[in-house]
Amino acid sequence: MNELIEAIKLSKIYNLGETHIHALKEVDLSIARGEFAAITGPSGSGKSTLLHIIGCIEQPTTGSIIIDGRDTGKMSQRALSKLRLHKIGFVFQHFYLLPTLTAYENIELPMKEAKLRRNERQDRVHDLLSAVGLIDRKRHRPHQLSGGEQQRVAIARALANDPPIILADEPTGELDTRTGSGIVDLLVDINQEYNKTIVVVSHDQEIAHRAERIIELRDGGIVDALY
C-alpha cells in the first residue's frame, strides 16, 4: 500500500504547571494515498491533537510523523511552512474565512502565498468555485453566505494549491443535518474524483459510515482501525 501519512510511536504531552496531560500515547498509524479515513472517539481522546500533528500545526513530544516520505521532525520551520502550503489543505469547524475578503479572494489567498501567476490563480479559483457550486457567490463576503456556503468556500480554499492531503476537523460541527450531509457528499466526491487523501475528525456518524476506514481513539491511543 502506498503510504502518504505515517505516525510512528507518536506521543504528545501537555504540561500545565505540575499537571501532565498525555493527549497521545505511542500512536502508530499509516494512511494510504487516496484513502478517506475518519478519526472518531469521545471528547478528550486525542483526535484533534493527532490531526494537528499530522498537519504540522503542532509537534509531537516524542515519535515521528512522516508526510510523503519526509520526516517532519527533521524539517526547519520554513520547510514545514512550505510543506503545509503545498501538501496539506485544512478545513475547520468554524470555517476561518477572512471576513474582509470575498469568497474568490479567500480561495485565491493560498495561491498568492505559493506565488502562482495571476492568470493561473484566476482559472483555478473559477474551477474550484464551480466544483463547490458557488460560482454565482464569488463576490460575496463571509457574512453574506450561509454556514454551508462558508464551509464550501473553506473546502475550495483547502484545495487551492492542489495538495494531496485534506485534513478536516469537525467540518459539519456548525451545520444542520441537511447542510452537513451536503458537505459530506462534497468530501466524498473530492476523495473519489480528485484522489485526495482525506482525514476527518468528527462526531458525525454519517462521515464515519461513509469513510473507507474508521480510526477510533480512546485515552490517547488507537483502539480500532476498521475498514
Image (spheres, rainbow, N blue to C red):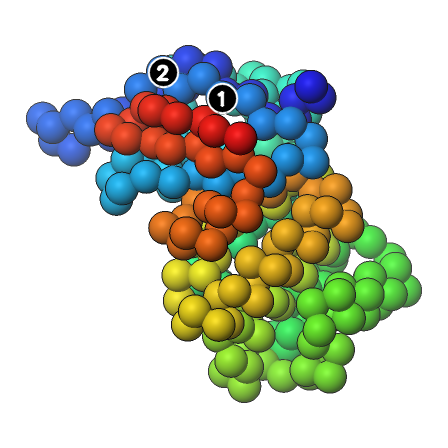
**Quadrant location of the N terminus in the rendered image:** top right
Q: Amino acid at mark 2?
A: Glu
Q: Is residue 198 visible?
A: yes
Along the line of sight, which residue is nearer the eye, 64 or 208? 208
Quadrant of residue 21 within the rendered picture: top left
Q: Secondary structure at mark 2?
A: strand
Q: Which residue is mark 2?
A: 26
Left or right of 48: which side holds 38?
right
Q: Which residue is mark 1?
A: 29
Q: Amino acid at mark 1?
A: Leu
Image spot of residue 123 (x, y percent): 87, 65
Left or right of 74: which side holds 122?
right
- The residue shown at (74%, 42%) is 195
Up-down relation of residue 64 to residue 140 (above or below): above
Left or right of 183: which side holds 203?
left
Please tell me whether mark 2 or mark 1 is closer to you in this view: 1
Image spot of residue 139 (x, y percent): 69, 83
